Structure formats: C-alpha cells, structure tokens
Amino acid sequence: MNVIFYISSAVAVFATILVITRTDAVHALLYLVVSLLAMAMVFFTLGAPFAAALEVVIYAGAIVVLLVFVVMMLNQGPVSINQERAWLTPGMWVGPVALSLVLLGELAYVLVGQPASPPVGQSDRSDGSDRSDRSDQSDMSDGSEGLRPQVSSLQPPVSSLPLLQSAIRNPQSAISQSPKAVGLALFGPYVIGVELASLLLLAGLVAAFHLGKHEDTERESASSPVGQFASSPVGQSACRPVNQSASRPVNQSASRPVCQSTSLQPPISSIRNPKSAIPNLFRLSPDSGLQEKDKGGAGK
Amino acid sequence: MNDLLWIIPAAPLAGFTALALAGRRLPHAAAATVGVGSVGVSAILSFLIGGLFLLYPPQDHAVIQSLWTWMNVAGFAPAVAFRLDLLSLLMILVITGVGFLIHLYSAEYMRGDEAFSRFFAYMNLFVSMMLILVLADNLALLYLGWEGVGLCSYLLIGFWSDDPANGAAARKAFIVTRVGDTAMAIGLFLLFTQLGTLDIQTMMQRATQQWPAGSGLAVAAAALLLIGALGKSAQLPLQTWLPDAMAGPTPVSALIHAATMVTAGVYLIARTNVLFTLAPVVQSLVAIIGSATLLLAGCSALVQTDIKRVLAYSTISQIGYMFLALGIGAWQAAMFHFMTHAFFKALLFLGAGAVIISLHHEQNMLKMGGLRRQLPVTFWTFLIGACSLSALPFVTAGYYSKDMILHEAWTSGPAGLLPWMAGVAGAFLTGLYCFRMVFIVWFGEAKTGATRAPGWAIHIPLVLLAILSIAGGFIKIPAMLGQVGSDGSVGPVGSEWIFQITALGFPLLGIGLAYTLYMRPRRLAQTRLQRPILDGIRRWWFVGWGFDWLYDRLFVMPFLRIARANRDDAADLIYQGIARLNLALHRALRATQSGQVRWYAAGIALGAAIILGIVVVT
Amino acid sequence: MTGIPPEHAILLAAILFLLGLTGVLVRRNVIFILMSIEVMINAAGLAFIVAGAAWGQPDGQVMFIFILSMAAAEVSVGLALVLRMYHCFKTLDADAASKMRG
C-alpha cells in the first residue's frame, strides 16, 4: 500500500507541475485530470474509498469537464498558445518559485520538523471518546489501545502533531472508512452542513445562470432602471427566461433535485429586483464589452 | 490743569484716527481743519500747562501723570505715564509750536494733492508719537514713540510712492535707523536685566548706586543707547539716510528732519545723562562724533546743488553741535541750541519749500537766481533764518546758542579744546555754505521765474518763525552777565568776552568769503575754483564723503550675494524634503495598488510566509 | 495496511498546495489561474482526508465532500465570470482588469 501511495503521489506532483507549465489550455486540463486521478489513488491508499470515488466523479468528471467546455467555447486556438508562450518567460518564475519554496520550508518545519511533545496519552484518547455525541463508530469504541506510542525502526521524524502520530499508529485507523460510515456521519451530526452545502450550490446555480445570460435578451426587455447606467438606452433587467441552454454551462447537481436545473424561471422572486439582491459587480449592461466606461468589473 | 497732560499727545492721535478712518470722504478743507486743529489744541494746552508750570513750579520740578499699566510680565511692568519737567516742557513747546506752524503751512503747500488727508493723518501720527517720546516716563514708552516716529518718517518720506526713488529713500532711512534702533533695544534689555526697571528716574538712581563710574556695564549700556541716538539723529556713521530723505515733501523735511525727529537722539542722551556721566569714555565719544560730523557735513553742504540737500547737510552739522555739547556735559547748551535750531531750520526749510512750489518744484539751486524781487516776504524771512544759522552776532538766536556751546567747550578743560576748535571751524563753514545758498538763490540774475505767489498760510508761519529766530535767544541775555549752570548756580563771567569775539569773527569770515566767491561782481567761484583737484574734492564731498559707496561695498553687496546664493532657500529644503519624502512614499505605496489579481495573491502568499516565519522563529 | 506516515501525506498536500499557489502567481490566463486554484482546493481536501485517516473517522471524508461541493459552486460561478470578462475585455489576460475604477 505504501508503495502505491508514494508512486501515486509522485505522479500527482509531476502532473501538477506539468499543469502549471503548459501553454496549451487543453493540455494543461488533461494533465490536471491525470493529477486528480493520481490523487484519487492516494485517497484510496489512505483508506478513503468514497472520497476517491467522489474525486474522480465530481472533480475530474465534472469540474474539469466544465473547464474543458469553457476553453472550447472560447476557442482561442493558436492565438492563446502564442500569448502564453510570450507570457511565460523564465524570469516570471523566479519570484513565485522563491516564495513557494520559502513557504514550503516553513510548512515542512511546522508540520514535520519539530520534536514532538511526549504523547499526551489518556487525555487525548479520552477527548476522542468524549465526543460520544457523534455517531458511534465501531472503530472508535476502544479507548486505551492507542495510547502507547509505537516504536519502529523506520520511524520518520517525530511529528509535532502527536495526535496524528498516535492516531495513525493505531491499527484501527488503518481500516478504511466505508461509504456507509460516511453516509451515517453526513446525515447524522453533519446534516446541517449538508443543508448549507445545498444552499451554496443553489446560490452558485443562480449566480451562474444570471451571469451567463446572453446580451440579446436584455435589449428587448424593459428594465427596472439602474441609476448609474442610465446612459445606456436599455437598462438592465431582472432575470428573464431566455433560451440559455446553449450558452449555459451544465450545472453540477451532486446533491440537487434534477428539476431545478431545467427550470427557466428563477425560483426566488427577489431576483426580479436585482438592485437589492445582487451587488453592482454582477450587473449586466447591453454593450458592456464595447464601452470604455464599463471597465472595472466582470459583470457590471 | 496738569490732569490734562495726556491730551497733549492724545489730540493729534485722535486727529490721526479720524483722518485715517474717514479722511478720504472729507473735503480737503475739513481734513486740513482736523489735522491742523488737533496740533493746535496740543499747542494751546502745552502753552497753558507750561505757563502754569513755570509760574508755579511743582514739587521736585516734575509732574507725573500715570494713566495705566501697559503690561505686567514677569516683573516687567511699564506704565503709560507722562512726565513733565523742564526738559520735556521745552520739547513739547517746540514740537507743538513749530509743528502747528508747519501744519498750517502744509495746508497750502499740499493743496491740490489728492492724498491730502493721508498726509495730515501721517503728520498727526508723527506729532503724537513724538510727544509720547518726549513725555514718556519710562524707556519702554519712549521706545514706543521712538519706533512710531521712525514709522512715520518712512511713511512720509515715501509719501509720493509713484516714484520708486522715493520708496527707496524711505527704505534707506528706515533701515539705517533700524540699526540704531536694534542697538537701543539691546541697551534697554541690558538696563532692564541689570537694574530691574525701565522707569527713567528710578533707573538712573539705581545705576549710580550699583555701577561704579566707568564700569563695563555702564559703558555698554551708554554705548548702545548712543548708537540708537546716532541712528535717529543722523550722526556719523549712520548719517547717510538724511540727505536722501529730502525726497519727501518739504513740510516733512521741515518737521521731521529738521526740527523734531532728528533731535530725538539729543533728547535721549539729555534724558539719560546720568548714564553717560557714569561712562566718561562714551561721553567723550559723543563729543568726538559730534565734532567730526559737523565738519564733515559742513564740507558736504558746501558743494551741493539741491537746495534741500544743503539744508539736510546743514541739519546734520547742527546736530553735530548738539552732540558736541552733550559730549562735554553742557546739557543746557545742547537743549538751547536744539530750540533755536528748530526755529531757524524749520524757517529755512519752509522758505525753501515756498521757493520750490513757486518755481513749480524746481529744486536745483543753479537754476534759481534773483528771486528776492519776486518773492519778497520769503526772501526776508529766509535771510533772517540764514543769519540765525550762521550765528550772526547779537541779533539772532542762533548766535546765543552756538556761543553758549563754544563757551562751554572752552571752559571744560583740555578735553574740550578739540571740540572747540571743531566748533569754530564749523561756524566758519556754516557761514560759508549758508550764504553761498543765499547768494545763489536770491541774488544774481533770474534764471527761472516765480509763477505762483504763496498765500497767507505760507507767509504767516514764515514770519512767526522769523520772529522766533531773532527773539528766541534773548532769554539768554540775563545769563550773559552770569553763567548759569545746569543746577542754577552762578559762575565767573569775565573770560567770556574774549571768546565771544572769536565766536563773532569766524562766521563773519565765512559770510565774507561767500560774498567774494558767489556775488555778482566777482564770481570767483566761476573762475578760480575750477581746478581738477578741487573738482575731485568737490565730487567727493558731493556724495557725502563716500559713505554710501562704503556701505554699499561693505554691507549691501555681500548681502545681495548671499541672498542670490540662497536663491533656492536652503532653509526651505527641510520642508521641501518632507514634501518630497511624502511624494516618494506615496509613489512607492501606489505601486502596491496595481489592480492586478496576481499581485494581490502574491501579497497574500508573502503575508502568509511572514506570519509562518514568525511562528517558526519563536 | 501499515500506516502511511501522516507527515508524508501532509507534506504531499503542502507540496501540491504550493504548486497551485505558484501557478496562480505565475500564469496570466484566467483559465489557468482557475485551474491552479482547483489544485489548491484539492490539496486542502487531501489534508482533511489525511486527518480523517489518522483518526480513523469518516469526518475527514465528510469535510472533503463539503470542500468538493464548494469547489463545484466556485468553479461554475468563476467560469461564468470568465465568460463575462471575455465579453468585456476580449482577452483572457488577468491583468486587463486592473483599472480599479468605476
């Protein structure tokens, strides 16, 4: 298992380096996919099969595909490649690489390099067992076994995270966490987080919907006047139903009901008055791309 | 009546205020009435109070009226207090009397000038300040008047400010007297810190108690006050401003630069004479300066062509006589000469002014001539004034006062010999230049005709001053029979007549020489005096013995050079540096607001690195 | 499975995170910047997984799921913004939007 971990992590690191150094966007995305798959393997070796599957399905399968869609939609072609080549001079790398190396050193020192305090022993384990309000996991039941710090000839430098150290030495922790356990935790103590995540996804959905709207539809619609854009002949409008399926990226729906994504009417009525709901940055105006005065924000 | 003492300086001050605030709206007749009337009120009051003072002398021979405490700061509490004793009484009688006549004269002289009321405002302010100066009981108030007359002198010299030369002359007067004023201020600081008071009588008492004669502090204080007096009275080495001050209107020259302001220095030394007796070195310096100045100015007066400049140098010379008298300890003689000088010098200036406006502002003597038939009243009064200046024996006031000085010089021992000789030589020179002026202007053939006859407002002051120039000395006749000392004691008599003969002779010699040189039959000046070496001397004397040139080289040009080198103002570099530092910091900070998202991300990463670094290190 | 030393896994997460950070700082194309941000988010998720594995609890994976959903929302909104920006500036240069005005 450890061998697979190291090989996968090497692949991940190498692929990530390639991601950030490519000039062609599609190449970089493909390397990103490779990196994410390698990360999934790492998750698997760490005993998180559900996370590994999600990584592949959602991260590599949806998010990266989203990025691929956008790249293909923008269709920059050789222009962008030359542009990237022009931008990526070796001199550009010096500063960021130096900064990152400094941060790496500091992180390594903080996470790995300090001598550990003596293992805190019972108190830590009892802390863990005090959290009995959580769903009882069979792996958690025994308390005292993980107390003894295990000694082995291949000990890495003692971590400053004694909990971590003692935890992983615990034989129970070597068992992977099954999806069932994850599900029980998710809809048990973390159910509020699930609801919040769904709200977040809803917000993302609505925002992406609104931002991705085509300009033609705005010209036709009478608008609720917006003060600072009064000079444009057509003010901006509330979200109106338009045919956006061609221009809208497909929304992810890991935890959302399917029917919502096909609805063209905005589910929340407050969106009809965008002034109160959405900040200025995301306002739309008809000729935003062509007017000099509209610099300064993506949406306006 | 003595309670009304304060009105004497206050009336002209009220006149100044009224004219300063409302003068422009008043018709000229009303402005003249206010201006002349306020000084008239002071004059009448001075005579009344003075008369009562002489008839019923008060206790200690002094009246003090204290009005209020000017300030009270750390033990320095001068009061606005006026002191009337014989010295200040003489001064206020002359100032208000002669001042009134000159104000009356200028009502006609300045007729038609559009700044008529401004003129009278300044003149009133001057009279008020001068009265404060002479009536002041403490040196702080005296210094107030001192500065006030300096200010008015500046304002009045540069009165016709359209011509930049007038402004330059005014500035020169102010700056040169400023040198003296600064020294005097330092002297006042010294006196206050050492003696604890500036009240004159108290101060002099304490000085006699605390300072032995000839001590360093006394010498320093006296010397500093002397420098102040030199500046105001235009004596060596600060005499360069007075000839140029003739750029002002003639009444100004008469009042300020002949009769009153330039005698402020004489008054100061007379007032603080105790201090000077405590410093004999300084006192002999006074005499030396007086002697040197009177000879120097006399020589310069001999070669001038502008009628007012002749009179200006003559003033310097006569004040030299007063300083000479002060230097040998003859306080009474100095003040007597001051009084007679005020009369005849004012008369001469006013007469010259009448000539000038009659000839449409022609001031060059060589363009004048034969005016005695055209301006008869002016001629006779001018002649009387000239005789008085030349100390014509027995009939003129100037004779008595100059004689008194020479007598005192002779009888004051070996130290007085040199001053005496200088005084006698000066008398000769005075007669010479004075009658040179008379013969050139009033006799001979007429070159420029007089077009405008002066009116009564000009003639009346001339006549009155002429009478005073004759009769002013007669109060001394009883004293001729017995010398009256400064404290009233009577001394020996006999030797006086010998020296009176000498004193008679020299002025007459001077007049005779002038006659031969400048009167029509001979006109020797045209022929005999045209040699090159005499030309050189004439040019040297014409520019006042080169003092202007000297001061220009010594002070003005180095100062201008330094100013030019400091054109960019080195002291300003600090503030400019602050501003520039600010701008540089601003520019540096502005670079951090590039608007580029990667720059801000780098900022976040850098901050994280720093914070982690702190965690790692500690 | 014998335990994988958590320090190594954490170090891997740190390395990936910093690679992503370098990518953000170096690249000018906004698509690449978004990609690098995804790399960083992924690395943070890895850290949580490591912690969960160390404790032997599913909490790490739960946290990872939340992070994943957040990344999904973020990338969709972000790409919509990229499209807006492209409409506005006609370029994908991140430095083009630096006027800070208006």
Image (cartoon, coloured by chain):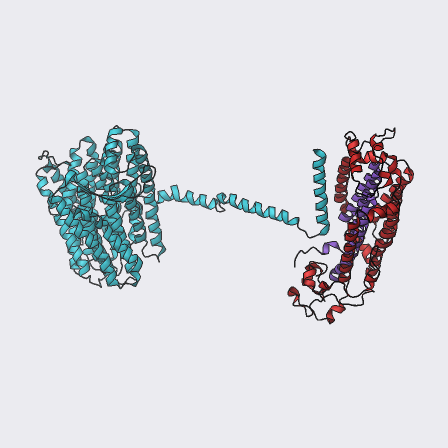
- Residue drawn at x 79%, y 35% as measured from the top left: A126
Residue nearer the viewer, C99 or B425 = C99
Locate residue C44 relative to residue A1 in the image: left or right.
left
Image height check: is C44 above or below B107?
Answer: above
Image location of residue A106, percent across then percent down = 75, 37
Q: Is residue B179 above or below residue A62?
A: above
Chain C, colour shown: purple
How many labels were placed on the picture?
A: 0
Q: Position of residue B252 (x, y in %)?
A: 26, 53
Residues B288 and B536: in front is: B288
Residue B234 lies left or right of residue A291; in this view the side is: left
Depth check: give the residue in front, B559 or A256: A256
* Residue C57 located left or right of residue B246: right
Give me the residue at 84% from left, 49% from top.
A19
Q: Colour of chain B?
A: cyan
x, y (%) of residue B323? 23, 40
Chain that the image shows in red = A
Q: Residue at x 69, y 64 (%)?
A: A273
Say which quarter of the image contains residue A115: top right
- Residue A159: image location, x then y, percent: 80, 33
